[in-house]
Amino acid sequence: MNTIWALTGVVIKELYRRKDFYVLFVLTALITIAAGSVRFFQDPNIVRYVKDLCMLLIWISALLITIATAARQIPAERESRTIFPLLAKPVTRGQVILGKFFGCWLASGLVLVVFYTFFAIVTGSREQYWPVADYFQALMLQWIMLGIVTAMTLLGSIIFAAPSSTVTILFIVVAGILFLGGHLNTVALHNAEPLRSLIYTIYFIIPHLELFDVRERVVNDWGLVSWLDCGLAALYAVAYTGLFLLLTWLAFRRKSLT
Amino acid sequence: MKKPSPYWLLALLLTLCVTLATVFVARAAWWNEVPTAADWNKGQSAADNVFKLLLGEGRRLFGNEMFVMADAYFHSGYYPSIFDRQETEHDVAMPAHGQVEDKNSTSDDFLGPPPDWIAALHRHFVPNMHTHLDDGGPSGHMRETEVQEILPWLKLATDMNPQYIEAYRVGGYWLRRLHKPVAARDFLFEGLQNNPGNSELLFDLGWLYNKDFHDANRARNVWLAALQSWQAQDITTRSSVDGANGKRLYDGITVNLAEVEEHAGNWSQALKYLEMAKQVSPYSNDIQKQIDEARAKMTGQSGAPKP
């Protein structure tokens, strides 16, 4: 376990040494503040469009940071040949994968804490209303979803040739699932066999990342989602994360490092 | 080379600060004010805004999308996607046209029963009930002023497409409902600036003057302009107004003009407008009743002994 935590610590340190997070955070902050400073019909209390925009930017930024961080972990170790001394120590390939996974996942969690704190301050100062529990639930659900994305990206980084291709493919896949994943069952109904069965199969196979998107509820003040439903969604995420990590380990286990 | 004393450097910096402060003081007044949407468009016509600069004429395509966003906000996010059954009428616009909000419209249950467990679980994480912002919102006890959240989208819809009359009308209506008659008037003015002589906008402006500013004279003049504008339109333009050859608008203008004249005691004018309304109104019997009452009052006044 100590080995895994040591690897995790290295990944987290890498996050704050790189500029990705700072650039995306400053961009998010600037766009949100610029949008928030515009007054429509001289009304200072209109706030939902700012919340909507800020949440969208948080989702895009968090996905970019998570995918970019996870995609370069193992390829970078191989390219700089630091993977050899790492594996020469009593560290197994499974531990490397788990260490990298927890490192990327915790790093994305830290990113979310910073982003949501900014979000809460900006919107709270404008509407004088602090639904902390709602924000916490949204953060937790997004973080759980990023666990699946991290595991998917680690698998991609083993399969695809370069981190750039992994980032591109994963971003397209994740965006596709978020936008279309939940509607594939409707699309399937409008198609004839065998396309219908094929689309249905994809619908039931893919991880439904859109389950964890509660932006609409947060923006429109719908209140908390039942914690039981959150627990079910978390179980669903744990299953998919475990599956992707297992596939990553299977692919990495016998992979030549030279 | 001899290093200058730090005190000299400090003095130099202080002088620089004071000099810059005197230069910037004139601008600082503007900095302290929060910019408004209009500030971004200063020096340009209302339709000649930042969106035109970025998107050109293509921005008009997004006008309807912005209006749909307003309707989605009106439903607190409970709104059909492109994969679901679509809204036939936008609920956000219905009160603006004097129609009762349809609580059981298409969007009431556009989702239907969940087809599988994934869809069933998903519904717990998204807005899942048909509500309206002016009617308590999702919690049922939100203030009516929450409806203000739709306003940015209506403004953006008109910025994108300055010929989007519906967005001006709906925006004007909700601003009135929010007790902001001045903002409503300015918004309608902006619409008229981009669409000179539009009979629908003139009708709404007249309504605003009459009901919110209690200025019957100005209302009468604006409605007369609306009537002239309507009469000058060809049948195709009228049909595009309300789908009934524009008769509903004509009915509204003439009935309101009759009411104003009645209050002013101009019975013959009131009768003239009521006769005009009777020709197109679906409630011609009611209008006839009003005509009879007006005639009775007119004869009563003219036959009454002078004090």
Image: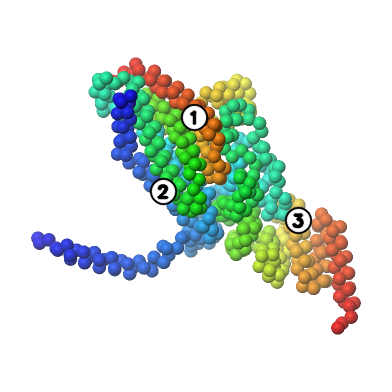
Per the model, the C-alpha gap separating discs 3 and 2 is 49 Å
Nearer the observer, disc 1 or disc 3? Answer: 1
Instruction: Please state the horizontal and vertical placement of residue B169, each as a whole percent of the image.
Output: 65, 56
Which residue: 32% across, 28% down? Answer: A5
- Callout 3 crowding tier (Cα within 10 Å): few <14, some 14–19, many ≥20: some
* Residue drawn 65% across the image and 49% down it: B135
Res. B248 mark: 3
Asked if both marks, 3 and 2, belong to the same chain, the answer given is no
Q: Nearer the viewer, residue A51 or A163?
A: A51
Describe residue A112's horizontal placement relative to residue B260 as left or right: left
Identity of the amino acid at label 3? Arg
Res B127 quadrant in image: top right
Residue at disc 2, secondary structure: helix
Give the residue displayed 49% in from the left and 38% down from the top: A137
- Marks 2 and 1 belong to one chain: yes
Which residue corresponds to the image point at 67% horizontal and 37% vertical from the top-left? B109
Q: Looking at the picture, how far across and down is residue A51, in whole percent? A: 50, 47
- Residue A29 image label: 2
Disc on the earlier residue, 2 or 1: 2
Q: Which quarter shows the C terminus of chain B?
A: bottom right
User: Which subunit holds the residue at mark 2?
Assistant: A
Foreground: A221 or B21?
A221
Q: Using residue A225 as the reference point, say whether residue A256 is left or right of it.
A: left
